[in-house]
Every structure is written in C-alpha cells, then in structure tokens.
Amino acid sequence: MATFGKRVQPKHRAEPGARKRETAPAPRPGSHAAPVSATEVAPAPLSPPTHAAPAPAAPELETPMSSELPAAPVSVSEAAPEPESPAAAPDTLRVLVVDDNEDVRGLLRIAFTRADIEIVGSAGDSREALAMAQHDRPAIILLDVNLPEVNGLDVLPLLREHCPQSRVVMFSAQCGSQITETAMQRGAVGFVEKGVSMKKVVAHLHEVARAPEAQVVQPFPLRVYP
C-alpha cells in the first residue's frame, strides 16, 4: 500500500495545543493572572454608618436683629438728675437762735426741727451771734435781749449792718413799751415774749419771713396774754 512508508499520527494527538487549552485548569491563587483594570477592582464607596452621631444643628439666634439704629447715649446728668438739697428748698426757713440759756436753745431746737425749720446755728452771746450770722446768712435771727457782755439791743444795729438780708425777731421775757420801741427803732421786725407756745412762735416766724422787707409784723410784741 502506498501508506506503508508514512507514519500516521493518532487523532487524539493531532492537536495537542488545542487540547491543552481546553483542559487547562483555572489558575491557582497567587499565580499570575491576566491584568484587571482599576475600574473593575475599585470597591464601591462606603456609606456612612447608620449609628453615627448626627451633625450638630446650627445655633438659633436669641433675638432677631433689628435694622433700626441704636438710640443716642444719655448722659448721667440727664438720666439721673441730682436731688435738691433740703437746705436749698424754698419752703425751708433758716433760723439762727441766740440765747444765753442752754435749756431754752435746746427747747427751740426740738420745736423747730419738728416744724421743718432749719437751725443754722445756736449762739450764747452777742459776739458769737454776729460771727455766725455773717457766716451762715440766716433768714431770721431770733435774738434774746439779756445777753452777757453786750445785750441784744446793742448788737441789733450791728446785725442789721453786717447781715442786711437777715430779719431780727427779739425773744425775751421783758417786753415793756420802752424795750419794744427801742427794738423797733434799731431794726427789729418782730418781738416774741418768752412763754408763748412753740406753735405760735413758729407761726410768727413764718409771718416775718413772708412779710415785705423792713415791715414790722403785728402784734408787736407777741405776748403770752395779748
């Protein structure tokens, strides 16, 4: 036969390469596989865990902002005016008491304080009375007649000269006609006899303060038993 000289290959060996490709096992882990693109292996983005703490809320405004301009600042003098001094009040009567008896001065001080009359000074003799009158400028000088060294009638012209704004009211247990006439001639505008009630003394001093300048206030003198 013509085929004697040729060696025939069996069919199962005819395509060794193709059979190997068909029966080739899958690559083992760690072996070199075909390269994979980054998009194929990139993991999906992780979603935030459900147990995460919520984000803090924005703080709320306490009060809405106003578009109006602030008011002009107020000065301290405008906001809180200074209170008036009681001594400067127009209804307060300022009196200088001149008497050599300390008990009489104390009694007058108590009565005048209750009647809202301010005692600017209390003198026991004429020299002290003149110095206080020039310094304190009282509205009324309640002057005793019987004073040590210089009596009230003799210091009366000096008080009128150095303190013309002060009105002098004599205050004495002696209120005879000669004494009262001398007091009037020397500038007294009132005369009160000692022993008159304190209520009448206070009322008489207010009448003297309201009277026109240099006008004598009647009754002159104001007696215990008019």
Image (cartoon, rainbow, N blue to C red):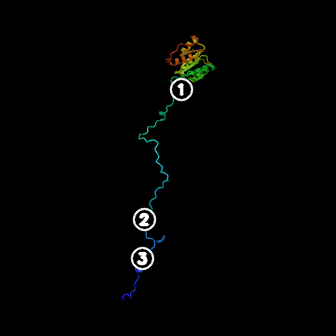
Q: Quadrant of residue 19?
A: bottom left
Q: Which numbered disc, 3 or 2, marks the residue closer to the eye?
A: 3
Can residue 186 be seen by looking at this rendering? no
Q: Are marks 1 and 3 in contact (CB under 8 Å)?
A: no
What is the CA distance from the residue labelled 3 to the residue labelled 2?
A: 31 Å
Residue 136 image position (x, y, % from top left): 55, 25
State the mark number for residue 19: 3
Report the amino acid beneath label 3: Arg
Report the amino acid beneath label 2: Glu
All told, the count of numbered labels is 3
Q: Mark 1 or mark 3, which has the lower sequence index?
A: 3
Q: Which numbered disc, 2 or 1, marks the residue closer to the eye?
A: 2
What is the CA distance from the residue labelled 2 to the residue labelled 1?
A: 100 Å
Of residue 132 and residue 61, the one placed in the foreground of this image is 61
* SS type, badge 2: helix
Q: Which residue is mark 1?
A: 86
Q: Residues within 10 Å of mark 1 (few under 14, many from 20)?
A: few
Residue in the image at 41% along x and 78% along y = 17
Report the amino acid beneath label 1: Pro
Q: Mark 2 or mark 1, which has the lower sequence index?
A: 2
State the mark number for residue 40: 2
Residue 209 image position (x, y, % from top left): 52, 19
State the mark number for residue 182: none
